Amino acid sequence: MGAIYIMWLRELKRYFRSKAQIIVSLGQPTLYLLALGFGFGPVFAKAGAGNYIQFIAPGVIGMTVLFSSIFSGMAMLWDRQFGFLKETLVAPVPRLNIILGRTLGGATVAMLQGLLMLVVCLIAGFRPTHAHAPGAAASYNWAALPAAAIFVALIAIVFAALGASIGSTIKDMQGFQMLMNFLVLPLFFLSGALYPLKNLDTAMTWITHADPLAYGIDGLRGVLIGNWQFSFTWQFNFLLDFGLLAVLAAVFLGTSAWLFSRIQI
Amino acid sequence: MIQVENLTKTFDQFTAVNDITFQVDAGEIFAFLGPNGAGKTTTIKMLTTLLRPTTGRIHLDGFDPWVRQREARQRFGIVFQDPSLDNEQTAYENMELHGILYHVPHRVRAERIEQLLKMFELWERRNDYVKTFSGGMKRRLEIARGFLHTPKILFLDEPTLGLDPQSRNQLWNHVKALNELEKTTVFLTTHYMDEADRVAHRIAIMDHGAIVAVGTSAELKAKTQTDSLEGAFLALTGTSLRDESASSTDNLRRFAQMWQKR
């Protein structure tokens, strides 16, 4: 227990100590929110699809959580470089506890980042809303926030564990950049964070449905803006999103623990 | 305390450690000397559960480090060739983290951290981030940390690399003092003959993955009919140079340093 706690605490300390980093890492999602949100807003509205800021806000929150969590896992690469990894590898505790602490710490940090991004979205005019019938007046739905937190947590754990699996495997910077281009960015762009997944052609439908983040974004958007405003909120459904992410979290946690336990230096 | 029998490690075609057998007694300071690439670090990695031996047997205080991993790990401390501190935490936090990972009870932990940090003259700097420390201070902190859980064996892999003579001198004084005070067995590797000569009770000379001689400094000198340990070393290992290729780790470390300077 002590090992899990101290590794978790380490991640939180790192987060709170680099205040500049907190702001910097919100910069990119904020740019997406504002530039795309207001830029595509008129087209989106003209297509009869409603308010684009409302649509994209859950997407950029998911984006923040994705980037923050997956990079926390890959940060193991730096620990490998600066040597701290070895201190944890020879410690007389199961490596499962080490990786669990790290991953949960990274996920906690990602959740905090997601929360901050939610605040940014609220400032930009986003409101969690809910209405029972299509066309009925939307009412603010602050009660959606706890449900949204569940999806934020799931996204955070899934991708922190995926990042930790990758961090246990790759050993140099080239691998890191390759993963950034061929894994993290596609995960984001194909997740439906920026556009609805409805009415895509068959190939795109298959690809987007294979993206785990799509289920996270779907859940997040579903609970945050209800199902009245767009015909395409809830591409999937709450149970599928929740269940799939929970299973993936378990699978990735297991994988990262296995890969981490096999590290030899 | 340490028993090694017929230990061998092969990487693909290359044999890094070739069938070595030796024994280190409790309370002894035992030095491994050898040119670059002789297999010293590979041996330490196998002894400390970081690398699985290809064949051979190891016992640390009676425990096989691959079978009873946790028991073995609890019994040794290690100072690696390159730093293994968390730069983003303070000296005290690094000690605290180590104490928790090694199950040092809360009250003992605080006492022992204070005692060791004072001994290694870091107590005044305990609340400073490790990234602000000099190379010598980081080394001292690592050694202090290695002793924190009162290990039976302390492994030191070239602990004085890159330190000035003052720091080296002081460091060995502390290690010797703790070896006498706590009866810690010390297993060290070094390039500096004078250090091995001064600190170690017994010395093993390693070359091309094999142990070519073991004994006290005096025995080695007598055996090779030389009057210094350096002379004995060169007589046993020859004078040719050993080149090591840079690993991907070295390359990445260079990159990381550039990155940090942003």
Image (cartoon, coloured by chain):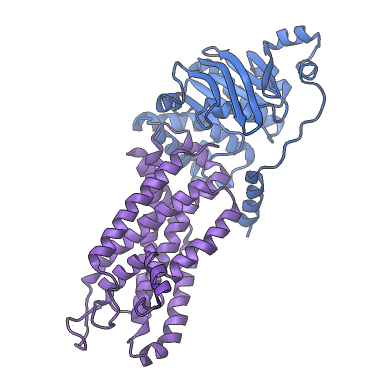
Q: Position of residue A151 (x, y in %)?
A: 30, 63
Q: Position of residue B232 (x, y in %)?
A: 77, 15
Q: Residue at x 70, y 34 (%)?
A: B164
Q: Position of residue A73 (x, y in %)?
A: 45, 52
Q: Which chain is purple?
A: A
Check the image and report above or below for B56 versus A106: above
Q: Nearer the viewer, residue A17 or A162?
A: A162
Which of the 4 image quarters holds residue A37?
bottom left
Q: Position of residue A14 (x, y in %)?
A: 46, 53
Q: Which chain is blue?
A: B
Instruction: State the quadrant of the C terminus of chain A.
Output: top right
Q: Residue furthest front?
A: A202
Q: Nearer the viewer, residue B99 or B36?
A: B36
Q: Residue furthest bottom?
A: A46
Residue A34 can be seen, yes or no: yes
Check the image and report above or below for A139 versus A207: below
Residue A14 can be seen, yes or no: no
